[in-house]
Image (tube, rainbow, N blue to C red):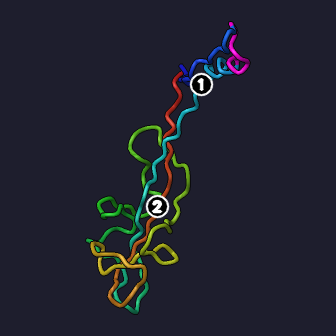
Amino acid sequence: RHAFRALAPASLAPGSKSPPPSAAGDAALRRQPVSRRRQMRTVEVYENERRLTVLRKYSADDLFPLDYSHYSDEYGTQRWSSLEEVPLPDGDGWRWASPFRVDYDGGNKNDEGWQFGIHFNTGWLSASNALTHVRRRRWIRDAEYAPPLPP
């Protein structure tokens, strides 16, 4: 079965028994199936790193066992070791519509999309300093809901 576009009935010209020429086109439109509306969701993942001293670079290898994992949700409750492990939204019919990309929008980020903090549960700054020991950046990917068409 198809969903059909609802159109207002064509009006007749005063004193006319036949619809205006455009009304014939309206009748044809009523028989055309409406294309499915695209449902999209943006999946967000945070890349997390730590540096042990000011003299060292930030690295996922230096994360502590109780830190957020290398890739996690915003609060560190969902954990992944790579972006490829991040699942599609729950439910059948979802597929990836884009690759992962760094989110540069919003404030408190440097040119590479990183935010810096003293710890993962503190506020975030756009630049590293002697007190910041962790950093994160947000990756986003679009998922599209495309359920199978009924037979």
Q: What residue is shown with label 1?
A: 33
Residue positioned 52% across, 77% down in the render: 111
Q: Amino acid at mark 2?
A: Leu
| SS state under label 1 | loop
Residue 70's x, y, as percent? Answer: 39, 69
Q: Nearer the viewer, residue 145 or 71?
A: 145
Reply above or below: 25 against 59.
Answer: above
Q: Amino acid at mark 1?
A: Pro
Residue 107 disc label = none
Reply above or below: 123 against 3.
Answer: below
Residue 138's x, y, as percent? Answer: 44, 66
Q: Write down the quadrant of residue 125 in the picture.
A: bottom left
Q: Is residue 33 left or right of residue 102?
A: right
Question: Which residue range is magenta in the image?
Answer: 17-24
One can see residue 61 in this view: no
Residue positioned 53% across, 19% down in the render: 1
Q: What residue is shown with label 2?
A: 83
10 Å crowding of disc 2: few (<14), some (14-19), many (20+): some
Q: Quadrant of the C terminus?
A: top right
Tell me the CA gap for discs 2 and 1.
Answer: 38 Å
Q: Is residue 141 left or right of residue 49?
A: right
